[in-house]
Image (cartoon, rainbow, N blue to C red):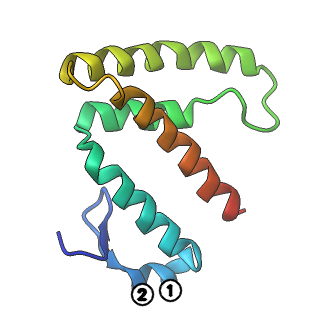
Amino acid sequence: PEQDTMTFSDGLTLNRTQMHNAGFGPLTDLVFAFANQLLPLEMDDAETGLLSAICLICGDRQDLEQPDKVDKLQEPLLEALKIYVRKRRPNKPHMFPKMLMKITDLRSISAKGE
């Protein structure tokens, strides 16, 4: 893939200018920086899918009526990611926490986009 482009799941590829013009505006640079931070983690499809699910199923979202139930849904996903990452990278125990820290980074970008 070209540098300074982002390819979406449907195959659409946009460069920085196109993303800015497509509505990302000032968030464009933050999104590219976040994507560049993910690259060194060398996440496979399973890790990406689990981390995405963990981001989506989060009990501390605003206006949830039963956040504790959402947290319970998230627990097995966290455990699955932890086990998978540790089996895939037995010599890199820091990888699971590094991946979880990306959720915080993503939330920071999301807050700036509100």
Quarter of the figure with the N terminus: bottom left
Please indicate whether residue 35 sits to the left or right of residue 106 in the image: left
Query: In the rendered structure, which amino acid carries the disc numbered 1?
Result: Asn
- How would you rate the neighbour count of disc 2 (Cα within 10 Å): few for under 14, some for 14-19, many for 20 or more? few
Compared with 62, 69 (above or below) is above
Residue drawn at x 43%, y 65% is: 33
How far from the left and from the top, in percent, is residue 35? 38, 59
Please indicate whether residue 21 sits to the left or right of residue 112 in the image: left
Q: Which numbered circle lies on residue 21?
A: 1
Nearer to us in this view, 13 or 38: 38
Nearer to us in this view, 112 or 74: 112
- The residue under label 2 is 17
Residue drawn at x 26%, y 40% is: 43
Which quarter of the figure has residue 99? top left
How far from the left and from the top, in percent, is residue 89? 21, 24
Which quarter of the figure has residue 65? top right
How far from the left and from the top, in percent, is residue 73? 56, 16
Query: In the rendered structure, which amino acid carries the disc numbered 2?
Result: Thr
Please indicate whether residue 101 sits to the left or right of residue 2 in the image: right
Residue drawn at x 33%, y 77% is: 14
Compared with 85, 27 (above or below) is below
Which quarter of the figure has residue 42? top left
Please indicate whether residue 79 sits to the left or right of residue 14 in the image: right
Q: Alpha carbon of mark 1 to alpha carbon of mark 2: how far?
A: 6 Å
SS assignment at label 2: helix
SS assignment at label 1: helix
How far from the left and from the top, in percent, is residue 88? 19, 22
